[in-house]
Amino acid sequence: MNPILIAVIVLGAIGLIAALVLYVCSKRFAVFEDPRIAQVNALLPGANCGGCGFAGCGGMADALVKGADKGSIEGLNCPVGGTDVMGQVADLLGMAIANGEPKVAVVRCNGTCEYRPRVTEYAGLRTCAAMNACGAGETLCGYGCLGCGDCVAACQFDAIHINKTTGLPEVDEEKCTACGACAKACPRSIIELRKKGPKGRLVYVSCVNKDKGAVSMKACKVSCIGCGKCQKECNFEAITIANNVSYIDPEKCRLCRKCVSACPTKAIRDVNFPTPPPVPKPVETIVRKEGQV
């Protein structure tokens, strides 16, 4: 028999056997994927930011489908898509969701260059993580913003930038999706996700310095000193003091702003409130004596 023909027959037989083996393995070890996962994934924004707590939108879609099979998707939320996307997902899965309140990232540091002067110069790798690993940074405050922009690099939505004048990051509330990437990137945990109040109004302590009052004031003129005056003014038990720093609970705060005026160091910020009208000057009354021109 022709050697070439023999080779062709042998190779054909080997290919046929391999095909049969692959077919049997594909059927025996096939992994079923619920088609709803792909449908849910198509509804999600595809940002893969991790704000939902999963590695990407695919993981979130899988968790939503599994949650629906168990009867609840409570606690699962896509901060980028918001209530509109979650509503579509809930309709697809035949579930009901509670309307979650929108959140926004806030920078809990008010130590601008004016109030928190630089006392040394850092010459290493220009990232917040590297600078924080080396110590207090360029100021005496070991808790405040380092200003290198790790949060800016982490944001996929161009919602946070470093103000060149103040040296602090500023959040664009219109662009912020509350994905939490900036908060995770900050080595000092000064960025917090807080719920938006009515008309986007917020009241929060813009300081996380845990040093005692005298020490923190030496480092920054607008730091919280834990004096408790704000706590005494609050009628809603929304303010607690721990480790020499105050914290305002957004769930309890009623935005009365009494704490803002009570703070002696102006460490409490109120955002998006209307500017009060100027107080009119009292009209000067001139009393003229009789016969006086």
Image (spheres, rainbow, N blue to C red):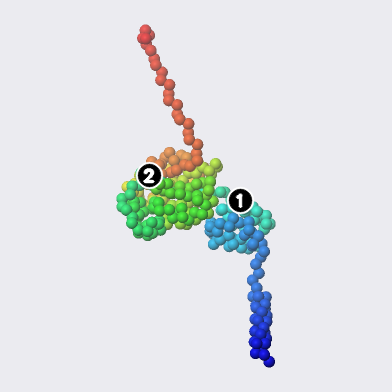
Disc on the earlier residue, 1 or 2: 1
Task: Residue under label 2, please give it.
Answer: 222
Q: Where is residue 2 in the image (x, y as percent from the top left)?
A: 67, 90
At x 62%, y 59%, the residue is 41
Check the picture and name the quadrant holding the N terminus. Answer: bottom right
Of labels 1 and 2, the one closer to you: 1
Q: Which amino acid does label 1 sit on?
A: Thr
Q: Which residue is drawn at 38% across and 56% down?
A: 126
Provide the secondary structure element on which disc 1 rests: helix
The residue at the point 43 percent across, 53 percent down is: 149
Q: Is residue 275 shown to the viewer in this render? A: yes
Q: Is residue 8 above or below residue 101?
A: below
Does dot 2 land on a helix, a strand or a loop? loop
C-alpha gap between disc 1 and disc 2: 37 Å
Q: Residues within 10 Å of mark 1 (few under 14, many from 20)?
A: some
> Label 2 amino acid?
Val
Q: Image check: 74 left or right of 264?
A: right
From the image, which quarter does the C terminus lie in?
Answer: top left
Q: Position of residue 183 (x, y in %)?
A: 47, 54
Which disc is residue 32 wearing?
Answer: none
Query: Which residue does the numbered mark 1 point to in the structure image?
Result: 83
What residue occupies the far top of the structure in this picture?
Answer: 291
The one of 43 and 269 positioned closer to us in this rendering:
43
Q: In this view, does 54 lie above or below 172?
A: below
Residue 68 at least partly seen: no
Residue 103: give x, y in percent of width and height: 53, 49
